[in-house]
């Protein structure tokens, strides 16, 4: 069955159980042609199960999978024309680089002459043209990752599926490979679905991100939308560092609300569709200013509890006189640190830099992460 959906990948109401564990709960997803789409979430949220559902490696309890508008729910993996790269690459140690890359083509019974040509061109694409005769043990982690990519791409798949492919690399190499992988994806133009639990990686590489929790999607959006406009406390907390302050709404108009947080009246500019009496204020640390030179909508007296020097910036942990715990991030000064632990400061931020989220959407524990203090 073929449907004109305009999407390269579509999952409709997919449910997958492993015994009593519900890995995917009526999960639906649409990925457009040529898109770099990331599934992001904590371990056990269903990211890899969603990827394996697309690849055909698991049998679904319910739902449908479409690739380029064609229903493939009941097709085996080798008939779905997807390429998959795993975290540990799964290269054959006794085969050369060229033999590893050619493996899928041989399974497809591609003529030998065409195999050699496609392997050569694909190794050039991943910048390993002179590595054809080497074995995996003779390669670095980054080179092995590129061979795994070449093996997936050489078969000319409809969709490329990547399951935490950079997870085994050290930080510097991982960052370099993020740039390489995104360059390669743009050059080839292949629709790519990427699984990671690394928020920075998702923000760096993706056209769109789906943040997952407990087998469901919490929010889908561009990196900017996910970071700047989270729709739940879970998304706000999972993407980057953030202050989450629980309070009581004491008044609201069309574009602003007032929230009582431990006796402090805080003003918030970004409102959800409905405002509940109890809510969470979300505020990024980089939006918090210490000893601001101009009046701001929110202003508190606080003490620096401790600080973390990050080289180019300093993360301050603060406690207001009302007992509200906050974090503020500011660029490091010439001397490195502007305020020492125990310093008294004024803390301010603009109302439009904070957003109001429903408390009921937050699975976070009460206490420090919700800015209540001890």
Image: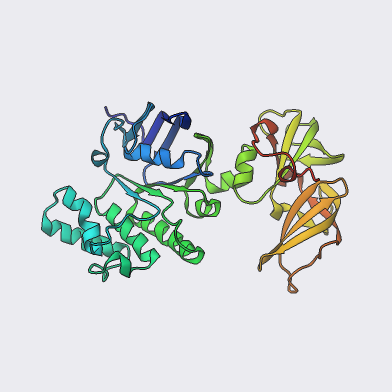
Colour mode? rainbow
Position of the N terminus, as image quadrant, is top left
Residue 52 visible within the image:
yes
Residue furthest to the top: 62
Vertical placement of 362 versus 100: above or below? above
Residue furthest to the bottom: 335
Vertical placement of 286 versus 20: above or below? below
Position of the C terminus, as image quadrant, is top right
Vertical placement of 2 versus 118: above or below? above
Identify which residue is drawn at 73% across, 71% down: 336
Q: Nearer the viewer, residue 158 or 84?
A: 84
Q: Position of residue 239 (x, y in %)?
A: 59, 47
Vertical placement of 122 versus 224: above or below? below
Identify which residue is drawn at 81% across, 41% down: 266
In the displayed structure image, the side of residue 147 where residue 295 appears, left or right: right
Identify which residue is drawn at 25% across, 50% down: 156
In the displayed structure image, the side of residue 368 where residue 12 appears, left or right: left
């Amino acid at each position: 069955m073929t449907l004109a959906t305009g999407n390269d990948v579509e999952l409709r109401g997919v449910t997958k159980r492993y015994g009593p564990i519900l890995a995917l709960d009526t999960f639906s997803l649409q990925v457009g042609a040529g898109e770099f789409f990331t599934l992001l979430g904590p371990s056990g949220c269903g990211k890899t199960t969603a990827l394996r559902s697309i690849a055909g490696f698991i049998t679904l309890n319910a739902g449908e999978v479409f690739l380029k508008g064609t229903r493939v729910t009941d097709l085996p993996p080798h008939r779905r024309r997807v390429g998959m790269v795993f975290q540990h690459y799964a290269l054959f140690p006794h085969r050369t680089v060229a033999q590893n890359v050619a493996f899928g083509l041989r399974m497809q019974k591609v003529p030998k002459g065409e195999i050699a040509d496609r392997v050569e061109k694909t190794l050039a694409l991943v910048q390993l043209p002179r590595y054809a005769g080497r074995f995996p043990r003779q390669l670095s982690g980054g080179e092995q990752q590129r061979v795994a990519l070449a093996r997936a791409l050489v078969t000319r798949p409809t969709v490329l599926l990547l399951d935490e492919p950079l997870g085994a690399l050290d930080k510097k190499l991982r960052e370099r490979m993020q740039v390489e992988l995104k360059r390669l994806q743009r050059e080839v133009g292949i629709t790519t679905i990427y699984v990671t639990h690394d928020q920075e990686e998702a923000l760096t590489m993706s056209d769109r991100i789906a943040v997952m929790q407990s087998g469901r999607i919490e929010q889908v959006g561009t990196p900017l939308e996910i970071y700047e406009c989270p729709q739940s406390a879970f998304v706000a907390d999972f993407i980057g560092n953030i202050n989450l302050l629980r309070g009581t709404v004491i008044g609201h108009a069309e574009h602003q609300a007032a929230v009582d947080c431990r006796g402090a009246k805080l003003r918030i500019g970004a409102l959800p569709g409905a405002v509940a009496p109890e809510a969470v204020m979300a505020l990024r640390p980089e939006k918090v200013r210490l000893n601001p030179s101009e009046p701001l909508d929110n202003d508190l007296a606080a003490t620096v509890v401790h600080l973390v020097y990050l080289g180019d910036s300093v993360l301050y942990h603060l406690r207001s006189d009302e007992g509200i715990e906050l974090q503020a991030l500011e660029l490091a000064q010439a001397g490195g640190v502007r305020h020492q632990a125990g310093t008294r400061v004024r803390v301010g931020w603009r109302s439009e830099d904070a957003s109001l989220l429903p408390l009921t959407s937050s699975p976070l524990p009460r206490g420090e992460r919700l800015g209540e203090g001890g």
